[in-house]
Amino acid sequence: MASKGFDATSLPGFTAIAAIAFIALYAPIITLVGYSFNGANSISSWGGFSFRWYEAAWANATVQEATIRSLVIAASASLIATTAATMAALGTTRRGSFAGQTFIYVMINQPLMVPEIVTAVALLIVFASVKVATGYTGLGYLILAHAAFCIPFAYLPIRARLEGMDLSLETAAADLYANPWQTFRHVTLPLVLPGIIAGAMLAFVISLDDVVITEFVKSAGQDTLPTYMLGQLRRGVTPEVNAISTVLLGLTVLLLTVFFLLTRKRD
């Protein structure tokens, strides 16, 4: 009789613990989404189903400005991070083992392994010195800070895609007298493109939702949508904040769904 492997679902209480975990994770989110349609002025009482606070958020000039700024920063940071991550992934996968390979992996993934507050303080110190030396206080600092933090998030799916590719295709292209650029352009890039798109979307989501690094690096008048919401929460929660949070949640879920579809393994 064949022995059965260990099955965690057969343990006593597994179903109850799983149910409690799911409730703890998703009940607050479901409550947030529900109360974003609250027609009352307070979140403590239900005033009927309404799109009132979505309309208020849409008409709020400050929200519009912060949203546009967030999208510009996230798009720019994801472009920079994805470009750097693609080059790093090619450099660490399209060659044999070399001295210092593990160290390079550690350095690329360093923002994932240290508390975000540490990265934020380090970026603050560097950019504060640059601001004093140059006098420039524009969005460039936020874009570079977000890009630096997002590189490992873009790197992981791109590297995973490259490691799963068959090197024989690139070898065959070289045997047919294709130079390195032609091999990359016509063979490697089309195959790795889903990983690049997935990495870019993941970097975009991380940048769009970031609060800690933004709070440390931004100058006056450079609030992004998350930092604007944080400021509003300090003054008192309103259903308008719930509506904005729900929109951000929907955008994040959409992008992460596409990310999953691009990176899942196909038989």
Image: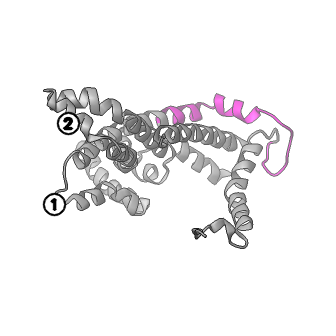
262 on left or right of 166: right
Q: Residue at x 30, y 54 (%)?
A: 108
Q: Secondary structure at mark 1?
A: loop
Specify the color scheme. one colour
**Would residue 106 be seen by someone viewing this image from the given angle?**
yes
- Estimate the x, y position of residue 53 in percent, counting from the top left: 73, 36
Q: Residue at x 61, y 42 (%)?
A: 249
Residue behind mark 1: 99
- Estimate the x, y position of residue 140 in percent, counting from the top left: 34, 39
Q: Start and end of the magenta stretch?
A: 41-69
Q: Quadrant of the N terminus?
A: bottom right
Q: Nearer the viewer, residue 164 or 118?
A: 164
Q: Secondary structure at mark 2?
A: helix
Q: Nearer the viewer, residue 266 or 15?
A: 266
209 on left or right of 53: left
Residue behind mark 2: 171
Please determine whether, in this image, residue 129 is positioned above or below residue 3. above
Amino acid identity at mark 1: Ala
Residue, far bottom: 12
Q: Nearer the viewer, residue 230 or 201?
A: 201
Q: CA distance from mark 1 to mark 2?
A: 24 Å
87 on left or right of 23: left
Amino acid identity at mark 2: Thr
**Would residue 137 be seen by someone viewing this image from the given angle?**
no
Q: Nearer the viewer, residue 49 or 82?
A: 82
Q: How many marks?
A: 2
Please determine whether, in this image, residue 14 is positioned above or below residue 213. below
- Estimate the x, y position of residue 100 in percent, counting from the top left: 19, 60
Indicate whether residue 179 is drawn in magenta.
no
